Image: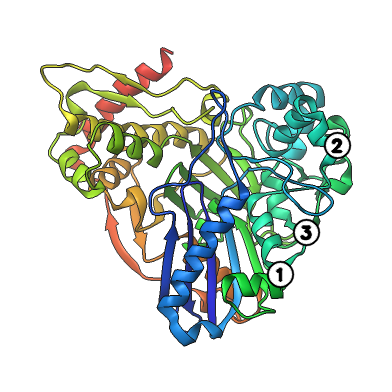
Amino acid sequence: MLLLGIDLGSSSVKASVIDGESGECLASAFFPKDEMKIIAHKPGWAEQDPETWWINLKASIADCNRQLGSRKKEVGAIGISYQMHGLVTLDKDFKVVRPSIIWCDSRAVKYGEKAFEKLGNDYCLGHLLNSPGNFTASKLAWIKENEPDLFSRIHRIMLPGDYISLRLTGEDITTFSGLSEGIFWDFTDNRLSDRLMKYYEFRNELIPTVLPSFSDQGRVTRQAAEELDLSEGIPVSYRAGDQPNNALSLNVFNPGEVAATAGTSGVIYGVTDQKKYDPLSRVNTFLHVNHTSDEPRLGVLLCINGTGILNSWLRHNAGNDIPYNSMNDLAGKIDPGSDGLAVLPFGNGAERMLGNRDIGARILGLNFNTHTSAHLFRAAQEGIVFSIRYGFDIMKETGITPSVIRAGAANMFQSPVFREALSCITGTEIHLYNTDGSIGAARGAGIGCGYYKSVKEAFEGLREVGVTAPDKSRTDAYHSAYSVWKNHLESI
């Protein structure tokens, strides 16, 4: 059997097809080849048209089909990974009411803060394990107050991955993990939070049918099969947000294991079996993909919004569109600390780690007689790493203390500067693997449809492709640069 994985990001939509038996990736493609547009009508806003996701998904699957040839008929299950915390609103005909308000949109911060105040610290942290913050529920509250005519038309709300599944199967379904990432889930009562729904005056009927991440979530319809040139009736058997899915792709299922990504945003995601939370909600806790009431598995997530998007901005605006590997080579010629140049990478919306403040990105210590574009490229990568280190200290308060970080050999983890800086400043080994979100989603599909008899069997094709350990000769320089960077941040 072949397994199809879909990874809906905010920059592109990627599809990969693996051979279920060997785990080998047989086809992979992503679209668009530049980056999907994020619509920002006002500062702090971020929207995307769900139809754009579907168009790019069709292009990615068409490319995979071309690579597979006649073997495309062997695809037997589909898994979906998607950008977390977004809001898709649908009318009674399941047509999109308005563009999706995506994860990095900041407009709903004050709605979450007010809910936190009114619902109370004890309830929010004890039951939701988070402040309602800027998550999906608060985004819906913004629509309710500011676009009441549109709100009155909403029949169902969905996360981005739920919408893609709807287009594939015609079924309006979400997952338990998805409800938790939207801050709709009561971790104490193990169900939809009645108190939150009542506070926001949301009808329970807005929520789709809820299923486990690994389950039969519908079958590809005739219409979708014709659009995608796939076989009708293929099950969608796995669904998860991009960060829980990234953890799955790296075989991170158990307490103490930690995964990382460094795409548009940068994330450290640690698994625990304890209901712990950060009192200030600077890091957030969600249901992991393999959570059950008998064996709880929760994911503690640190997110830095401005990661790969900063690198991309520099490439287009300061690097004359040179290849990323050339930027990495230039950065590698500069010593740690970038000769005093520091970059705060917070230019992609409100940062949860900073208490939902949107302080913008900043370049500090720039000297026209000393610094070059190479210094800027290194300082940007170091700034992202230092942001992760800053959040690492917060994560430790929830019991996440890793000695190893697992990551796919993709995005910024392809940069030797990034890997070395992260390893030195966190004191961890960075282990890279031959996987990404779309391949992980394909493996998840195999687990969900029962093709794999165990998780171990699903990951027999996962291979370690590199290890970066702390370089003791450079660790002091990184820590010195981090102290300067941290002082800059805390002075704002």
The structure residue drawn at horizontal position 65% and vertical position 41%, both measured from the top left corner, is 99
- x and y percentages locating residue 179 in the rendered image: 73, 48
Q: Left or right: where does residue 444 sit relative to residue 16?
A: right
Kindly identify the amino acid type of the residue bearing the numbered disc 3: Asp
First-in-chain label (1 vs 3): 3
- x and y percentages locating residue 16 in the rendered image: 47, 69
Q: Nearer the viewer, residue 379 or 438?
A: 438
**Label 1 vs label 3: CA separation?**
14 Å
Question: Which quadrant is home to the C terminus?
Answer: top left
Label 2, secondary structure: give it.
helix
Foreground disc of the pair 2, 3: 2
- The residue tagged 1 is 215
Q: Nearer the viewer, residue 47 or 484?
A: 47
**Label 1 vs label 2: CA separation?**
32 Å
Q: Nearer the viewer, residue 305 or 407?
A: 305
The structure residue drawn at horizontal position 55% and vertical position 85%, both measured from the top left corner, is 73
Q: Left or right: where does residue 164 sit relative to residue 211?
A: left
The structure residue drawn at horizontal position 64% and vertical position 58%, both measured from the top left corner, is 164
Question: Which quadrant is home to the N terminus?
Answer: bottom right
Kindly identify the amino acid type of the residue bearing the numbered disc 1: Ser
- The residue tagged 3 is 172
Which numbered disc covers residue 152?
2
- x and y percentages locating residue 196 in the rendered image: 82, 35
For mark 1, does the 10 Å Cα neighbourhood hold few (<14), some (14 to 19), or many (20 or more) residues?
some
First-in-chain label (2 vs 3): 2
- x and y percentages locating residue 20 in the rendered image: 51, 81
Foreground disc of the pair 1, 3: 3
The structure residue drawn at horizontal position 52% and vertical position 79%, both measured from the top left corner, is 457
